[in-house]
């Protein structure tokens, strides 16, 4: 994840300069194309309430493109249904997707037959944000730490079930990575969205989850579930008292990220216009404040940086999937 941290730092330095060039290019393009002339559709590949939905709605609320941005939730198949819809849409800048680490770097290794190519069928716009996953457990599970959990799992193989909002999500593969690195076993229980999994976690039908921080942290603070650790290499500024998994399981790291993509062959002036608006929206002080409270970190990039980072992530997660033996059931 060193490259991601590099993007975080370099974005602060070069983002404004890039945004200025993009705005200039967009202005010139605008005289030729008058883009946009109708509302934009921003597809979210998961149900409402999760991090990608929150980020999409922030963009919808704050974007100033001269047209509205309508958020369209199309969940299912670990995000593949919504991503495939955008992959097969016209490359005219009117249909976009809030891609995730799952839809654009993990799923290709998990699913034997993918309906789209994670790279060839999309044009990168910008990396938007990253966040840890939060290892949370049911309050009745007799564990208070990662070490407790590992000991319990080794004493009770396959007794526990971990939920996820779908096969191939970072929530899913975080669990698979944990199993692989700790030599433990548990059952994966995929749901059609995290809002379906959480009631079962609270009720005890499933016992743990590596949920996205923006979804899980508020519930943990309310005492509805117990937070054990974050999955990033370093502790989160949103919850500095919560340790990392790596403090117990050396080398463990899993970061979820979110990025905006357009269909393949979308003209560069349109991509530049959208990138400039992403840069502006997610740098607004009130947007930054809301994201930080949820454990989201703005990681704004150029289209080219996103393309390079996506390639690195595809290679990384293919290795994790292969070593863990995870499959799309």
Image (spheres, grey):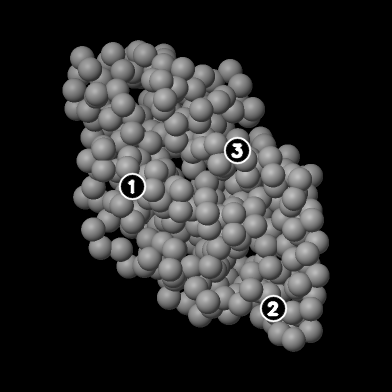
Give the image location of residue 226, x and y in percent: 45, 23
At 46% from the left and 53% from the top, the residue drawn is 311
At 29% from the left and 23% from the top, the residue drawn is 182
Find numbered disc 2 in the image and state the secondary structure of the residue it sits on: loop
Residue that mark 3 sits on? 5
**Residue 49 versus residue 119 in the image, above or below:** above
**Residue 166 versus residue 183 in the image, above or below:** below
How many residues crowd around disc 1 within 10 Å: few (fewer than 14), some, or many (20 or more)?
A: some
Q: Quadrant of residue 175?
A: top left
Separation (CA) of disc 1 from disc 3:
21 Å
Q: Which mark is residue 318?
A: 1
Q: First in sequence: mark 1 or mark 2?
A: 2
Separation (CA) of disc 2 from disc 3:
33 Å
Q: Is residue 174 left or right of residue 255?
A: left
Q: Quadrant of residue 261?
A: bottom right
Q: Which mark is residue 36?
A: 2
Q: First in sequence: mark 1 or mark 3?
A: 3
Separation (CA) of disc 1 from disc 2:
37 Å
Give the image location of residue 308, x and y in percent: 52, 54
Q: Is residue 287 left or right of residue 190?
A: right
Give the image location of residue 160, x and y in percent: 25, 27
At 54% from the left and 31% from the top, the residue drawn is 217
How many residues crowd around disc 3 within 10 Å: few (fewer than 14), some, or many (20 or more)?
A: few
């Amino acid at each position: 994840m060193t490259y991601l941290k590099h993007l975080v730092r370099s974005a602060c330095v070069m983002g404004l300069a890039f945004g200025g060039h993009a705005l200039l290019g967009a202005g010139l393009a605008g005289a030729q194309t008058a883009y946009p002339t109708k509302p934009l559709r921003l597809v979210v590949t998961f149900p409402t309430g999760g991090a990608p939905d929150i980020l999409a709605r922030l963009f919808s609320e704050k974007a100033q493109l001269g047209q509205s941005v309508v958020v369209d939730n199309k969940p299912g198949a670990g995000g593949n249904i919504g991503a495939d819809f955008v992959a097969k849409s016209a490359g005219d800048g009117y249909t976009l997707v809030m891609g995730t680490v799952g839809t654009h770097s993990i799923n290709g290794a998990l699913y034997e037959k993918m309906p789209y190519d994670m790279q060839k069928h999309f044009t990168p716009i910008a990396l938007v944000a990253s966040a840890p996953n939060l290892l949370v457990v049911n309050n009745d599970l007799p564990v208070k730490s990662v070490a407790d959990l590992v000991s319990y799992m080794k004493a009770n193989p396959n007794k526990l079930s971990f939920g996820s909002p779908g096969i191939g999500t970072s929530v899913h593969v975080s669990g698979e990575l944990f199993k692989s690195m700790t030599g433990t076993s548990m059952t994966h229980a995929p749901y059609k969205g995290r809002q379906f999994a959480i009631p079962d976690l609270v009720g005890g039908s499933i016992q743990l989850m590596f949920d996205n921080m923006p979804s899980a942290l508020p519930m943990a603070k309310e005492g509805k579930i117990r937070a054990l650790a974050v999955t990033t290499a370093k502790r989160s500024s949103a919850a500095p008292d919560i340790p990392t998994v790596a403090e117990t399981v050396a080398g463990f790291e899993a970061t979820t990220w979110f990025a905006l993509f357009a269909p393949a062959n979308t003209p560069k002036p349109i991509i530049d216009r959208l990138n400039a608006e992403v840069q502006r929206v997610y740098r607004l002080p009130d947007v930054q404040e809301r994201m930080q409270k949820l454990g989201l970190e703005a990681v704004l990039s150029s289209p080219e940086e996103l393309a390079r980072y996506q390639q690195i992530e595809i290679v990384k997660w293919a290795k994790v999937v292969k070593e863990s033996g995870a499959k799309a059931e």
